[in-house]
Image (cartoon, rainbow, N blue to C red):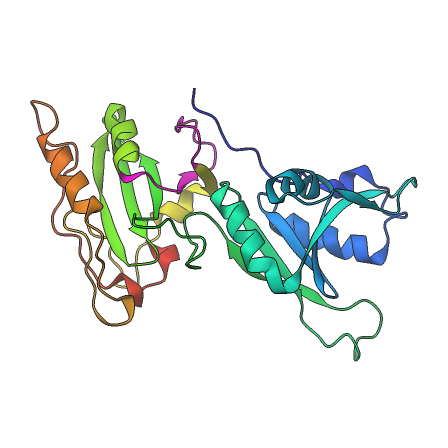
Amino acid sequence: MATTPKQAGEAPGKKLAPSRATPMLKQYFEMKSRVPDAILFYRMGDFYEMFFEDAKEAAPLLGIALTARHRDSDIEAPMCGVPWHSADHHIARLISAGRKVAVCDQVEDPRAAKGLVRRDITRIITPGTVLDPESLPSGSASYLAAVVVGERDLAGVAFLDYSTGQFHAGTVPLQRLPDALALFRPREVLLAEGSDLALPAGIALTRRAADWFARTGASGMPPGPIGHGARSPGRCGRSSLRRGDAARRHFARRGSGAPVFRGTNGSRRLCDRDPRDL
């Protein structure tokens, strides 16, 4: 049965009266409101702390103790934390479990701060945009997918391996979309807000406003349709992954009618483009 992954941490500020929240918690709530679907790593000294629902979700996944700040008070905050120097390892574990992580760092010298140290979100890591080798699957592609339901029971689909620049895009009959997702096995799928499209369980889901999908690339043209995977030289490096081409050939062979994917060569220098434009 298709499911939508649980969102990490739901507006914990609603559980506290604003007059009772400490300055630190107010700052935390402000940062958390910007990334409601990610687990927030909030830097405090030599640790990254997680609070409320984020802590309850992350602690068992990371194998660390769940404690509480201001225990037995009306502003008790469940929490857990990891040392800053091992944060990447713990982020990798959460990404492998299909979660998204937002890193909130101190952006001023605590010794020079007047009052609460200023903080800001410096990184957001999702299963489909991870670049850290520790978080990438060994020997296989790591696709970020975008799916838009169109007319005539067709879906527009795009698959990007953010770590290599390999890119495929085109259309697929809606009833064959599960086949496309099963073959490319994306780690994350982008869907429009309000879409009721059911996805296979285990794929991280990120929603964007419908008009976000209508944006064109840097050239002023929409991304090219699916075809051969991008093998871009230079800064992208040369991809040794062949699964995309194998999947494309498989789609072309499936069924007695037209190929599942329609399109021409979609190879472009994606490393020179903002991935948000894809």
The one nearer the camera, 184 or 269, is 184
Relative image position of residue 106 (x, y in whole percent): 69, 68
Relative image position of residue 179 (x, y in whole percent): 25, 29
The one nearer the camera, 154 or 232, is 232
Relative image position of residue 175 (x, y in whole percent): 26, 23
With 39 as the anchor, is 65 left or right in this view?
right
The secondary structure that most of the magenta stretch takes on is loop
Which quadrant holds residue 84?
bottom right
Q: Residue at x 51, y 52 (%)?
A: 92
With 200 as the anchor, is 7 left or right in this view?
right
Q: How many marks?
A: 0
With 135 as the anchor, is 45 left or right in this view?
right
Is residue 153 depicted above or below 137 in this figure?
Answer: above
Is residue 256 depicted above or below 128 in this figure?
Answer: above
Residue extending farthest to the front is 63
Residue extending farthest to the bottom is 112
Residue 222 visible in the snapshot: no
Magenta residue check for 119: no
With 269 as the anchor, is 23 left or right in this view?
right
Q: Residue at x 19, y 49 (%)?
A: 242
Residue extending farthest to the right is 73
Magenta residue check for 201: yes
Which quadrant holds residue 109?
bottom right
Q: Residue at x 47, y 41 (%)?
A: 207
Quadrant location, the N terminus: top left
Relative image position of residue 83 (x, y in whole percent): 67, 60
| Magenta span of residues | 184-203
Q: Residue at x 81, y 57 (%)?
A: 24
Residue 179 visible in the snapshot: yes
